[in-house]
Amino acid sequence: MADHAKTRAVVLISGSGSNLQAFIDQVESGELDLELALVISNKAEAYGLQRAAKAGIATKAIDHKRFESRQEFDQALMAQIDTAKPDIVILAGFMRILTAEFVNHYTSRLINIHPSLLPKYPGTNTHQRALDAGDEWHGASIHYVVPEVDAGPIILQGRLRIKSDDTENSLQQRIHGIEHQLYPLAVKWITENRLTVSKNRVLLDGETSAQQLQTFDL
Ligand code: GRF
């Protein structure tokens, strides 16, 4: 961590930003001791940018379509992120695949939330895939980012039982409920310096903890 007391975060979004809102709410209520230094979206119209502005957080839109290549976009993104000198970079519904160069630049500082119980269902359509497979459980995972998409050591997972009448939409909504509780919690653990990674596993206070898999009745 850098030498300033409060953990500084840059949040990357592409859309609604309901997870960003969960961070804003917990920072405002004092539950989470985090400096939300900058929110960046690759889409200027992302509603999350309005949420950030309303909360008095600096915002920036960088349209990926303006760049010739993924590399050039990622370079511009890195340059912008680094102006904010973040301790952590939070991917919160950022819908771009990042280059290995970008990911390696933020090793151990870059986290993501993914709407499945990883390693199940990396990629998209996770809710429908869980339904199609007849799974008993579905959930969300918060993990450190490595160059391979939706891989990387898992910090925390939340799960719920799939109901017989669940649809893709109902599942998505219930999983969002998990995300909004657990993503700020994972970041809280980071701000409290409680996480370490050993042999590709994330430890809480030096051990694997039952708190890292939480079951919800939503
Ligand atoms: C979440 O479901 C997250 O798991 C996925 O993108 C979605 C973002 O939602 N990576 P929001 O923009 O935070 O509302």
Image (cartoon, rainbow, N blue to C red):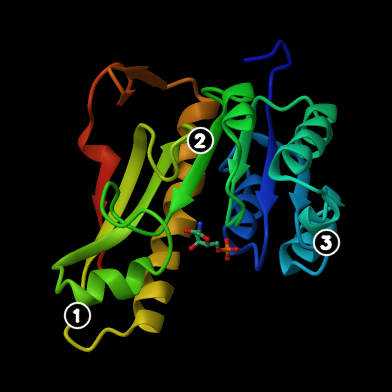
Instruction: Determine which residue is flagged by label 1.
Output: 163
**Which corner quadrant holds the N terminus?**
top right
Percent across and percent down for residue 120 are 26, 53
Q: Nearer the viewer, residue 59 or 96?
A: 96
Amino acid marked by disc 3:
Lys
Percent across and percent down for residue 123 are 41, 57
Residue 81's disc number: none
Instruction: Determine which residue is flagged by label 3.
Output: 54
Percent across and percent down for residue 183 are 48, 48
Q: Residue at x 40, y 69 (%)?
A: 125
Q: Residue at x 75, y 54 (%)?
A: 41
Alpha carbons under labels 3 and 2: distance apart:
23 Å
Mark 3 vs mark 2: which is more N-terminal? 3
Q: Report the label total.
A: 3
Instruction: Determine which residue is flagged by label 2.
Output: 188
Q: Nearer the viewer, residue 27 or 124?
A: 124
Indicate which label's residue lies in the foreground, 1 or 2: 1
User: Is the distance from the Cβ of mark 1 to the nearest ligand 1 atom less than 8 Å?
Assistant: no
